[in-house]
Amino acid sequence: MKTNRLLAALLLAGLATGVAAQAGRDNLSNLKQMKVSNVDLNIPPVPQTGRNADAIRANLKNVKLPPGFKIDLYAVVPDARHMAVAPSTNMLFVGTRKTTVWAVTDRNGDGVADEVKPFAPSLQFKVPNGVCWTRDGFLVVAEHNRVLNFPAAEFFYEGPDVAVIELVPQGKLISPEDESYNHGARTCRVADDGTLYITLGQPHNVPPEEKFASYASQGIGGIVRMNAMDGSKREVFALGVRNSVGMDINPKDKTIWFTDNQTDGLGDEVPPGELNRATKAGLHFGYPYWNGKFKVAGSAAAPELKNMKEPANAVFPQAEFPAHQAQLGMAFYTGGMFPPRYQGGAFVAAHGSWNRTKPTGALVNFVPIKADGTAGQPEVFAEGWLDGTGVYKGRPVDVAPMKDGSLLISDDFAGAIYRVTYAPN
């Protein structure tokens, strides 16, 4: 009798799970039609006080910044990755490599978030790492293999049901057969003309030659672009990239800048990290022949590519960083709070190494931009999340200027967002 009751309970549990999963799949259709999803209207927030928040603040005492700068905890945000600062309110949206997009709100404008809760929880996100805004307030979420657009997200995030436009349906950003757990985090930016740019990392340490043509046609290992409102006019914008997990548009000359991660398995000192600049469509940034100015083809990481032909007119990085620091998010500083030397330059987050004998990274660089629009020499701006014993206390992912001129830094290891401010000594 007990066995029968157990079997019945398991069957009911399985049925309930299946129904819930089905409801999650159907919610996109409901929301596209402005229908309700019938999920709980109350969305539990993430606690912002307590032992965890206190420990994060204590770790920040070890972070070193230039004179006059100060760093504080802005919000506790689990798995915090890329950030999109809202255009009209004191809030931002934060992507993750899991299943949640976070809505982070500073309701009283005191420079510290008051509320952190899931955005559009009735939807089933899959690696919603990339978040970015159109000029007129539409939030784009770039998942592993889908792209959604949420009109007026900053004003309609309170409940679970929000308006949504499906720019790229599930399974249509890349071929499903090329989906991988490796290098699946997308980043995005929207240009002034409404063109959406999305980075597509390729799912290998070094891609096999038989994948070159397929990847090139899809834009895997590069950047694709399309209309941010309906997904039309899609095309491959750039190729020759290994795995870019950071991108921004220089507001002065509208060029596209992006980071690129290094090939693993070649030792502690090579290849370099990259910061690249695309001045027009159709450029090739050298990979997998080049990684920076290190030749990967024919190396220990790719001996089978020893006869690979060098890509014509390959574009080399604007700036290079120490090997294996894993540069991810980047942003041009558009604020007025920081001293003039930082204004118009770029901040770049370095996540920190895994494929290295002695860990390195877990910092934020500053890269000045010259009058001709090219990059100057990178310098360390913030460091200290990697302690003297080689243990990570945090791993910066992304940077984002706030409207008041402060700078946000996300950290998916600590599950936090920090705020950097400046006041002359």
Image (cartoon, rainbow, N blue to C red):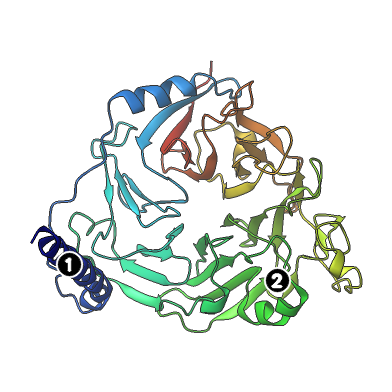
Badge 1 element:
helix
Report whether 292 appears left or right of 28: right
Q: Residue at x 46, y 57 (%)?
A: 129
Report whether 158 appears left or right of 254: left
- Marks 1/2: CA–CA distance: 45 Å
Residue 134 appears in the rendering: no
Residue 63, percent across and down? 55, 24
Position above or below: 419 against 243 = above
Residue 18, percent across and down? 23, 71
Q: Residue at x 47, y 29 (%)?
A: 421
The residue labelled by disc 1 is: 16
Residue 33, percent across and down? 21, 79
Q: Residue at x 73, y 77 (%)?
A: 212
Q: Amino acid at mark 1?
A: Ala
Quarter location, residue 209: bottom right
First in sequence: mark 1 or mark 2?
A: 1
As rendered, which of 115 and 393 lies closer to the eye? 393
Q: Amino acid at mark 2?
A: Leu
Residue farthest toward the top in the current orientation of the protein: 425
Mark 2 crowd level (few <14, some 14–19, many ≥20, 10 Å Cα): many
Residue 221 appears in the rendering: yes
Position above or below: 196 against 360 = below
Badge 2 element:
strand
Report whether 170 appears left or right of 263: left
Residue 239 numbered tag: 2
Q: Are marks 1 and 2 in contact (CB under 8 Å)?
A: no
As rendered, which of 82 and 78 lies closer to the eye? 78
